[in-house]
Image (cartoon, rainbow, N blue to C red):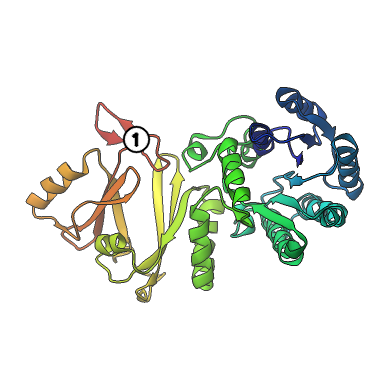
Amino acid sequence: MVITGGAGGIGRALVERFTREGARAIVVADANLAGAQAVADEFGATARQVDSGSEAGVVALIDFATETHGPIDVYFSNAGVGGPAAGPETPDEEWDRLWRIHVMSHIWAARKLIPVMTEAGGGYLVNTSSAAGLLIQPSAMAYTVTKHAAVSVAEWLSMTYAAAGIKVSCVCPQAVQTALLDEAMGQTSGASEVVAAAGVLQPEDVADAVIEGMRAERLLILPHQDVADRMVYRATDHEGWLDMDETLAFYVDLLGCEIVTDWGWQVGTDVADKITALHDCSARSVMLRKGNAFIELFQYTSPEPGPGDPDRRVCDPGLTHLCFDVTDLDEEYERLLAAGMKFHCPPQDVAPSVRTTYGRDPNGNVIELQQVSDDKHRIAVPWLPERGLAQ
């Protein structure tokens, strides 16, 4: 098998995992030959330098792997680049670079390998796209567009060549702790505290998901499970989904917030109905973090929300709800209930290590009490033990 982008990050994790799975031979390919060689030496593989942004480079890699180890059973097109945080002003040379690496590299590999694999009775083509290829990366137009195209390439190949025994998978991770993520965060090493708390997977987690997905022969391999929920929301309420992304672009691009979680629920989620005191509610929820503060955005699609007033006076009601993190939710709930506070429901388990309840202040504003019992959870708030307050 061949793995491009194999010198580090997801690529290195794939080499390690496929070695454990008993791959007959692996060619570790990367533009960084020294890095590829180090990984190859560690796992008993073969290193090869490749320019994934040129057809000649991809063809030469395939020829080398075939001549060295025989026919290729699995070709994993994993090379990728970050690209600029920009929109239409992205320079043409950057568009061309991302298009070649994120899209054409998969096409060039398929052009070379499909005739050979078809004659042999089958083979497996895998490419790495991104959750941005199924949704949107608000701050990076070229990255989003080319990753969407990568998904389309995989879908077309799968539909067209399945009968010939060609299997196709497309890996669409969200945030993964790699040098590419560090680059996106504007850092030279290590992710920021914010990103480290934001549901970031390790490359080994992605490799595990790949093995599971390939065994099941799934087209889309989604290491972050909440991506599937967001795809459903996009499909069922596209306009609403875009409206939320317009708001997200303001908070993320202009105010510098980081997305911690992006998920939602559909009609029929009993615990959501209990907490919100609504019937058959559905919504998208995005948790943002700026420094040591969290901001949670909701967009309800059911029941039909009433009209909003973007020009409402500052003295008029406007907050959906205010959330307070607590260390003992049951104790706080009983204390406030005894003091006369009205709650929608008793504390509810809403996610692993997360419990919450909604109530009302004297003016009817919604107050949420939330307890996160795992201090390593992605939405856990750092605490000052001597004061019992969130930092």
User: Quarter holding the C terminus?
Assistant: top left
Q: In the rendered view, would you say 171 is above or below 180?
A: below
Apparent side of residue 139 relative to residue 225 in the rendered image (left or right): right
Apparent side of residue 208 relative to residue 379 in the rendered image (left or right): right
Q: Position of residue 355 (x, y in %)?
A: 28, 48
Residue at position x 46%, y 39% from top?
197
Q: Is any atom of residue 126 visible in this view?
A: yes
Question: Tag 1, which secondary structure?
Answer: loop
Return the residue nearer the eye: 364 or 18: 18
Q: Position of residue 360 (x, y in %)?
A: 20, 59
Q: Is any atom of residue 91 visible in this view?
A: no
Apparent side of residue 107 relative to residue 297 in the rendered image (left or right): right
Q: In the rendered view, would you say 279 is above or below 6?
A: below
User: Quarter holding the N terminus?
Assistant: top right
Q: Quadrant of residue 284?
A: bottom left
Residue at position x 88%, y 34% from top?
68
Q: In the rendered view, would you say 168 is above or below 37?
A: below
Instruction: Name the residue that disc number 1 marks.
Output: 391
Q: Position of residue 337 (x, y in %)?
A: 11, 52
Residue at position x 63%, y 38% from top?
186
Return the residue nearer the eye: 272 or 89: 272
- Characterize the local packing of mark 1: few (<14), some (14-19) or many (20 or more) Cα atoms within 10 angstroms: few
How many numbered discs sit on the rendered protein? 1
Q: Quadrant of residue 302?
A: bottom left
Residue at position x 52%, y 72% from top?
239
Return the residue nearer the eye: 125 or 367: 125
Q: Position of residue 21 (x, y in %)?
A: 64, 35
Q: The disc labelled 1 sits on which kind of residue?
A: Gln
Apparent side of residue 97 relative to residue 387 in the rendered image (left or right): right
Q: In the rendered view, would you say 104 is above or below 301?
A: above
